């Protein structure tokens, strides 16, 4: 009986741990906070409607980067981007600066906002995911 209780405790802890790792995002609250971060740090270049500026700053509307691999998206904000990229058939060569000074929470919120605005619909991003990307460098 004692062994069984220990077993239950271990299983329960494992489940709690897994949930903490995955981190369920309250999308609505995160989007609201993220909008403020976007207005302050991204809007000047990517514009209020996420449409960007042709040949200068790429749009954030249903792009492969915004909707695709989360790690790549987080890394663009953390490290910026210097390589020419093609977005929706248009080439962009201007660099984007690193925004690593933003907190994990701010980056998670702004990307959750972007992934759920401008016609985008995608899962949220958690501070834990940002933290993980930051640690990898
Ligand atoms: C000074 C202007 C500027 C600011 C501020 C800026 N960006 Fe960018 N962003 C760019 C440029 C220019 C590129 C293209 C970089 C390249 O060609 O390598 C880019 C690329 C991107 C991309 C990948 C391409 C795409 O359109 O899908 C994403 C995503 C992105 N930015 C998100 C953000 C977010 C989120 C913020 C705010 C935290 C932000 N940017 C702030 C100019 C900016």
Image (cartoon, rainbow, N blue to C red):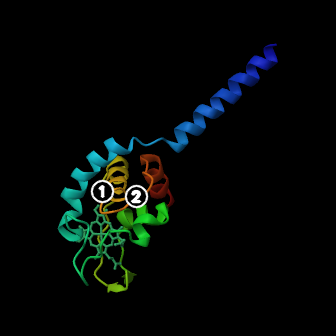
Q: Is mark 1 within 8 Å of ligand 1?
A: no
Give the image quadrant in which the ligand numbered 1 is located.
bottom left
Residue 8 lies, in percent from the top left, at 72, 23
The residue to which callout 1 is attached is 101
**Label 2 residue SS:** loop
Look at 24% across and 69% down and name the residue there: 46
Rendered view: 131 above or below 78: above
Query: In this view, which residue lies farthest toward the front?
Result: 119
Question: Is 14 situated above or below 30?
Answer: above
Visible residue check, residue 130: yes
Residue 107 position, x and y percent, is 34, 54
Q: Which residue is mark 2?
A: 121
Residue 100 position within the rendered picture, expressed as x and y whole percent measured from the top left: 34, 59
Instruction: Give the quarter of the image for residue 57.
Output: bottom left
Q: Is residue 137 visible?
A: no
Image quarter where the N terminus lies is top right
Mark 2 and mark 1 in contact (Cβ < 8 Å)?
no
* Camera-side residue of 8 and 104: 8
Residue 137's label in the rendered image is none
Q: Is residue 41 left or right of residue 84?
A: left
Give the alpha-carbon distance from disc 1 to disc 2, as whole Å: 27 Å
Q: Is mark 2 within 8 Å of ligand 1?
A: no
The numbered mark, 1 or 2, whose residue comes first in the sequence reads 1
Residue nearest the observer in this picture, 113 or 62: 62
Q: Residue at x 38, y 67 (%)?
A: 76
Classify residue 3 as left or right of residue 132.
right
């Amino acid at each position: 009986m004692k062994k069984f209780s220990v077993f239950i405790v271990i299983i329960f802890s494992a489940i709690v741990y897994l949930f903490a790792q995955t981190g369920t995002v309250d999308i609505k609250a995160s989007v609201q906070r993220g909008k403020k971060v976007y207005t302050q740090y991204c809007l000047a270049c990517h514009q209020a409607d996420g449409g960007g500026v042709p040949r200068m700053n790429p749009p954030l509307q249903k792009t492969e980067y915004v909707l695709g691999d989360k790690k790549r998206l987080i890394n663009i904000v953390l490290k910026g981007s210097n390589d020419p990229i093609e977005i929706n058939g248009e080439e962009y060569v201007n660099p984007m600066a690193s925004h690593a000074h933003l907190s994990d929470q701010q980056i998670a919120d702004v990307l959750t906002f972007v992934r759920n605005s401008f016609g985008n619909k995608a899962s949220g991003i958690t501070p834990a995911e940002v933290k993980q990307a930051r640690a990898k460098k």
